[in-house]
Image (cartoon, rainbow, N blue to C red):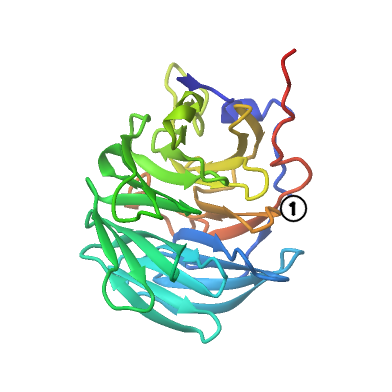
């Protein structure tokens, strides 16, 4: 079932258009395209934000409640860094590199070590808590998912996927892995050595991103063709599955320009979510009401990554080239920045449910 929440075009003529005037740029951003953003889930006082980039670095910034930012630490990979993630206790950052390595940086000692290696570039990594402490799960273009126990050498386990891993997300015990050829593997991290279930994406084009619901009951899928699908894990909830169009221009002479959905982030408190795309816009949505809460004006370049801070009061989005049009469009003056959007009032609050009499 496909529904249309409302297109980017509709946003400009309705009161649901959002405001960017309070957005603040991060100081000293990366010097090449930004691949990943991750806020610390625990930092007391100021927020910590990790940023991974094609300039081979991971940078950690401290951000005050007023949006002031300062670089706190940086470390290197041998090649572009394709993803990063904070540990659940906020003490470590993991990163996935095109150099085939997964690194973990301990923020207290500022030491970084290689905890694992794949046979091909590592596209994505996430921390999760096992019964024996923090572990890292990584997904690679070598078509495997591997688990890394920080206390031992070599992978704790390896899962063979159908194709190259393009995207992955973890929430609680739910791990969702999106591969080439539109396969989506669901893993229960209490039983991590096998797939709980495998589906093929309901979207007809390449998967760009998967993102777990805040309550881990399901996940969203974004594709290169300006669509998003909402999928519940359990069969009993499958009648709530649906997909919708987003990040596309209004038809012009019967031609519709569509854009990749580059990232999807769920609000940690309200369970609503954002989509962000190659068209340089982001939108906030309420999946339960099947309603778009707010759409925002173009930000001057593709949005490559997004994330909310732990309290949901800051929405960070990275503006940089996403390679969707090939190398020739990556010009010297293309913007590279991370913007901090203060989440005000009801921007991300779900719509009040209307009970039927």
Q: Residue furthest bottom?
A: 109
Residue drawn 62% across the image and 25% down it: 10
| Quarter holding residue 158 | bottom left
Q: Is residue 324 left or right of residue 339?
A: left
Question: Who is closer to the viewer here, 251 or 86?
Answer: 86
User: Which element carries disc 1, helix, strand or loop?
Assistant: loop
Examine the rendering and report whether any part of residue 80 can be seen. Answer: no
Q: How many discs mark residues in the rendered view?
A: 1
187 relative to 112, above or below:
above
Q: Is residue 47 left or right of residue 236?
A: right
Indicate the position of residue 82 as horizontal and vertical percent values: 38, 61
Query: Which residue lies under the disc numbered 1?
Result: 22
Question: Who is closer to the viewer here, 293 or 118?
Answer: 118
Indicate the position of residue 232 as horizontal and vertical percent values: 47, 35
Residue drawn 69% across the image and 35% down it: 350
| Quarter holding residue 311 | bottom right
276 relative to 234, above or below:
below
Indicate the position of residue 242 as horizontal and vertical percent values: 48, 26
Few, some or many residues within 10 Å of mark 1 (<14, 14–19, 20+): few
Question: Who is closer to the viewer here, 295 or 96?
Answer: 96
Quadrant location, the N terminus: top left
Q: Residue furthest top?
A: 357
Q: Is residue 357 left or right of residue 251?
A: right
Residue drawn 65% across the image and 30% down it: 11
Q: Residue furthest right?
A: 345
Indicate the position of residue 357 as horizontal and vertical percent values: 75, 12
338 relative to 232, above or below:
below
Question: Who is closer to the viewer here, 242 or 282?
Answer: 242
183 relative to 322, above or below:
above
Residue drawn 73% across the image and 71% down it: 45
């Amino acid at each position: 079932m496909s529904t249309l929440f409302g297109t980017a075009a509709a946003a400009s003529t309705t009161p649901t258009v959002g405001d960017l005037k309070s957005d603040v740029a991060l100081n000293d951003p990366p010097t090449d395209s930004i691949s990943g953003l991750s806020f610390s889930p625990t930092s007391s006082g100021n927020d910590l934000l990790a940023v991974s980039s094609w300039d081979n670095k991971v940078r950690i910034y401290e951000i005050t409640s007023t949006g002031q930012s300062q670089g706190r630490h940086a470390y290197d990979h041998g090649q572009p860094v394709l993803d990063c993630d904070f540990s659940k206790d906020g003490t470590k950052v993991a990163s996935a590199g095109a150099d085939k390595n997964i690194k973990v940086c301990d923020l207290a000692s500022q030491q970084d070590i290689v905890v694992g290696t794949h046979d091909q570039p590592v596209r994505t990594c996430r921390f999760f808590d096992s019964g024996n402490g923090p572990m890292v799960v990584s997904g690679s273009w070598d078509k495997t998912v591997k688990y890394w126990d920080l206390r031992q050498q070599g992978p704790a386990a390896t899962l063979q996927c159908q194709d190259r891993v393009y995207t992955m997300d973890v929430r609680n015990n739910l791990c969702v892995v999106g591969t080439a050829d539109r396969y989506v593997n669901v893993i229960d991290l209490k039983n991590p050595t096998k797939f709980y279930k495998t589906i093929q994406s309901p979207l007809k084009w390449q998967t760009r991103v998967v993102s777990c619901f805040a309550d881990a009951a399901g996940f969203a899928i974004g594709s290169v063709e300006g669509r998003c699908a909402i999928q519940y894990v359990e069969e009993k909830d499958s009648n709530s599955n649906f997909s919708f169009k987003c990040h596309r221009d209004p038809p012009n002479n019967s031609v519709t320009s569509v854009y990749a959905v580059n990232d999807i982030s769920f609000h940690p408190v309200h369970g609503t979510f954002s989509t962000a795309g190659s068209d340089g816009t982001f939108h906030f949505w309420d999946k339960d009401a099947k309603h778009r809460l707010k759409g925002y004006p173009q930000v001057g370049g593709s949005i490559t990554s997004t994330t909310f801070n732990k309290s949901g009061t800051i929405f960070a989005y990275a503006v940089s080239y996403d390679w969707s049009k090939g190398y020739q469009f990556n010009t010297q003056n293309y913007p590279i920045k991370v913007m901090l959007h203060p989440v005000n009032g009801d921007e991300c609050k779900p719509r009040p449910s209307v009970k039927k009499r």
